[in-house]
């Protein structure tokens, strides 16, 4: 059975895959990479690389699907790509943990590493954090779009200054990444309690991410002293 947006209802595996293809493909790819690398040797780097591959695939597929849609299809795709609040929190927390793990694993004992390996390990740590950072804000971008168009009026929770009724995916990207970069909403207003709760969660997670990046900079700098 389909809902008013043409999306299938139900909780079966096939329905989940159809509605969350980007996530499913990313998870499968990440697990495959981890399993392939682990067949030779089990290391923490294998887990990080699996995470990075899975996150990159999710980001690429999500951005492609959302940026190639038009305004009339945005509502359906926003719903199809969205997650529940609980799953959003789990995935966002996973991104934060992956970033902290990337720092801990790659920068542990960096002072005792040969100079040629220092740059490689520092680069892996930086790449893991940046990819996880983009992954986090992509999750919230999709969630903001879904929350906005899921309202009874078809557009609730955010007020955009130039196109208040029909924002496109770029508008939600702008809103989400502004919070991620500057911890503020800039010229976009929040007009509903559910959206405020979502923005609060986003702001708190962004703060921890920015703190992680600062810790990375300090550790990398100290390793070269």
Image (cartoon, rainbow, N blue to C red):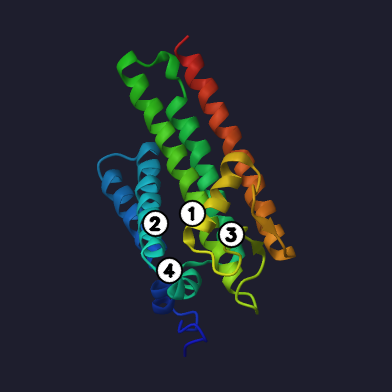
Q: Nearer the viewer, residue 59 or 23?
A: 59
| Real-space Cα separation, disc 1 to disc 3, in angstroms | 23 Å
Please name the residue shown 49% across and 63% down the image.
168
Residue tagged by mark 4? Answer: 20
Residue 27 x/y as whole percent? 38, 58
| Image quarter of residue 160 | bottom right
Q: Earlier in the sequence, mark 4 or mark 3?
A: 4
Q: Mark 1 packing: few (<14 Cα in 10 Å), some, or many (20+)? A: many
Please name the residue shown 39% across and 72% down the image.
17
Q: Residue furthest right?
A: 193
Q: Earlier in the sequence, mark 1 or mark 2?
A: 2
Q: Nearer the viewer, residue 181 or 207?
A: 181
Q: Nearer the viewer, residue 24 or 154?
A: 154
Residue 102 x/y as whole percent? 46, 35
Please name the residue shown 47% across and 15% down the image.
223
Q: Residue furthest bottom?
A: 1
| Real-space Cα separation, disc 3 to disc 2, in angstroms | 30 Å
Q: Nearer the viewer, mark 1 or mark 4?
A: 1
Residue tagged by mark 1? Answer: 138
Whether label 1 touches label 2, CB < 8 Å: yes
Residue 24 appears in view: no
Residue tagged by mark 3? Answer: 162
Residue tagged by mark 2? Answer: 58
Q: Earlier in the sequence, mark 1 or mark 3?
A: 1
Whether label 4 touches label 2, CB < 8 Å: no
Q: Nearer the viewer, mark 4 or mark 3?
A: 3
């Amino acid at each position: 059975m389909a809902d008013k947006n043409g999306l299938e209802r139900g909780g079966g595996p096939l329905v989940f895959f159809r509605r969350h293809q980007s996530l499913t493909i990313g998870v499968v790819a990440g697990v495959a990479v981890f399993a392939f690398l682990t067949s030779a040797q089990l290391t923490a780097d294998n887990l990080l690389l699996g995470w990075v591959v899975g996150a990159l695939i999710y980001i690429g597929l999500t951005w492609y699907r959302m940026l190639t849609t038009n305004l009339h299809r945005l509502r359906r795709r926003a719903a199809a790509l969205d997650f529940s609040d609980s799953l959003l929190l789990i995935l966002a927390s996973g991104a934060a943990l992956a970033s902290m793990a990337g720092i801990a694993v790659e920068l542990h004992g960096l002072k005792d590493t040969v100079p040629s390996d220092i740059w490689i390990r520092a680069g892996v740590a930086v790449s893991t954090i940046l990819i996880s950072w983009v992954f986090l804000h992509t999750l919230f971008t999709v969630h903001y779009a879904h929350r906005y168009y899921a309202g009874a009026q078809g557009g609730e929770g955010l007020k955009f200054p130039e196109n208040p009724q029909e924002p496109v995916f770029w508008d939600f990207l702008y809103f989400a990444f502004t919070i991620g970069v500057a911890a503020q909403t800039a010229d976009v207003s929040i007009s509903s309690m559910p959206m405020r709760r979502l923005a609060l969660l986003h702001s708190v997670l962004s703060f921890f991410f920015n703190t992680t990046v600062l810790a990375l900079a300090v550790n990398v700098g100290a390793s070269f002293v």
